[in-house]
Image (cartoon, rainbow, N blue to C red):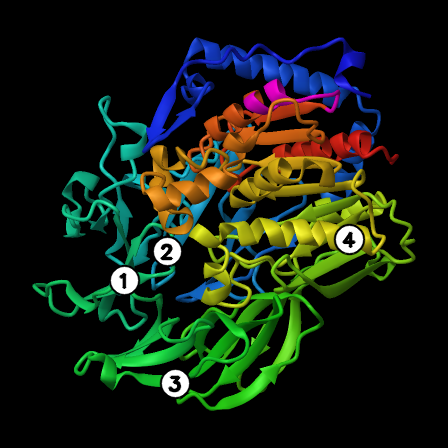
Amino acid sequence: MNLTQFNLSYPQSPPGHAIDSYGDIQVKDPYRWLEDPNSEATKAWIAAQNKLTFSYLESIPSREKIKNRITKIWNYEKYNIPFQKGKRYFYFKNDGLQNQSVLYTLTSLEAEPKVLIDPNKLSEDGTVSLSGISVSEDGNLIAYGISRSGSDWQEWKVRDVETGKDLADRIEWVKFSRASWTKDNRGFFYSRYDEPNESTKLEDTNFYQKLYYHSLGTPQSEDVLIYDRQDKKEWGFSGKVSDDGSYLIISVWRGTESKNLIFYKDLRDRNSQVRELISEFEAYYSFIDNEGDTFWFVTNLNAPKDRLIAIDLKNPEGENWQEIIPEAEETIQTVSLVNNKFIVNYLKDARSLIKIFSIDGALIRELELPGIGSVGGFNGKRSDKETFYSFTSFTAPNTIYKYNLETNQNEIFRQPKVDFNPENYEVKQIFYNSKDGTKIPMFITHKKGLKLDGNNPTLLYGYGGFNVSLTPNFSIANLVWMEMGGVYAVPNIRGGGEYGEAWHQAGMKHNKQNVFDDFIAAAEWLIKNNYTNNKKIAIFGGSNGGLLVGACLTQRPELFGAALPAVGVLDMLRFDKFTIGWAWRSEYGDPANPEDFKTLYAYSPLHNIQPGTSYPPTLVITADTDDRVVPAHSFKFTAALQAAQAGNNPILIRIDTKAGHGAGTPTDKIIEAVADRFAFLTRVLDFNY
């Protein structure tokens, strides 16, 4: 069914006259007016687009059936990895369909858990979520951040764990920050921005982050400024107190690049100044732990797949650094120090591999895992004997394990019961060649017995940027898609972190076209190998993955049966004009730089829409309060694509309300969105459920 059968036309999107000059090139921006979310014209456009989109979606017979099945299978207990502070344990749990997971505490693993924070009671519609927590060293206090409607802005409060009552402390204008308590439990460090005022421009709200110390029982106005740099407006600061309480380690970040500085402050001396340890943006350093004046870091300096080093503060020069665990063939994801052993989580061809080393770097053992999947956790202190970790895969729900490092004993702590049989599905990993011959891995999951007749509805998902690795992960949405007869495919394209920093750099800035070529080659492989055809394959991705989908959609419109770009970065000439967009220049380049402009203009989805082209059915997805990737990207892209479209393939936009970039989205909104996506695909890919 197409739009003409509804006797509907696209809402009016009158072009404006905005033009920008980039050297000798004049670039029209006819839908600039949609950048103002508060204008009456934009509000009317949003209302009309949603009316059109939901009238289309609501007419699809399978929509309610899909929603009911997702809801039914979603309804199972979900646990997060527990952790210990003082004499208490803490963990998140969702009973099944709760909009937000609830934080529990208990005095032993056998004790009766007590609700500590239930975010579902913070709003009637579930749109207020916990954005972060930090428990004091004695386990008696918890600082917690809340976010409203998915915003990156956070408000932090403090709760007494025993009584469950909030203290008077209240911290505002926090973004991209956590809290880190001092050893004496009297306060914590955090980072914030200045309070915006009426003259603050949207693009100026995320500059000049400052690091503060908050003392319990005092107003925020009395918080102590620990560090800021008025000469470096793009610098941000993340403060972490060492486990022994002796040092504040300050990671200095600049945008999203995989490089940072390391400063520190001696907390044993009240009058100590912040000192620089790593003072050049040449590599990435992640603080793991310390023993006195010896600091352990994971770094990619001279090691694109990372290594573990030790730096002695008494002799901090580079020539005195000690390599503890050298770079390996596999890529290091995380390192933790528990029971005086380094637990290293590696990626080997995008799947987890766990190795345990002694304090001096000698390999002790490799941890046996249940299968091919993704592992997280291993938190704890050097003195702990036990730790917890999670394992998940495409067909295995997130299972929590308790692991004893002294006896090497593993036991299941929490295992969910989901209404499906994993034996009915199969997962394989293949490798294919991209346009330039680079070998790319891809996971393919589907029901057993799938006929390779070239006619299977296929969902190809990707990201390809910011050093983010896509590893096997259990998803109710993907499970239902496979129940419907669909194939789910995830290629580990360049721009991600699956093979270290070199893999990341091969898909950023002037190399960004590699990302799109890798994704296009994945679609071509699936078609060539008879999984699907160009009328049955849909592409999906969010945020930077939305850019991926938008670029591939405009470069190869004939290759895809449908496209679902979600909360995407789609205007590559103005992405840095909004909120935190300036920070992505390190990934994409600077539109004001002539050489970067050429690259960005060449693939920018908005600027490569060609009038009179037949584009595949497209459902653009965004949210009205997304302050990470502002919805103007999706608005302008949709308006331009609707104006250019030839033929009857629908170009629709789904604009969620009271929602942001994705974090903290209530369960009911997630289920609605998945049902709408899949219902759309059943119609435009022409298959039944």
User: Does any portion of residue 339 appear in the rendered image?
Assistant: no
Question: What's the mark number on residue 526?
Answer: 4
Q: Amino acid at mark 4?
A: Leu
Q: Earlier in the sequence, mark 2 or mark 3?
A: 2
Residue topped by disc 3: 324
| 575 to 304, vertically: above or below | above
Which label lies toward us, 4 or 1? 4
The secondary element bearing badge 2 is classed as: loop
> Residue 5: horizontal and vertical position, in percent?
81, 13
Q: Earlier in the sequence, mark 2 or mark 1?
A: 2
| 603 to 262, vertically: above or below | above
Q: Earlier in the sequence, mark 2 or mark 4?
A: 2
In space, the residues marked 3 and 4 are separated at their CA atoms by 43 Å
In space, the residues marked 4 and 1 are separated at their CA atoms by 41 Å
In space, the residues marked 1 and 3 are separated at their CA atoms by 22 Å
Of residues 6 and 385, which is closer to you in this image? 6
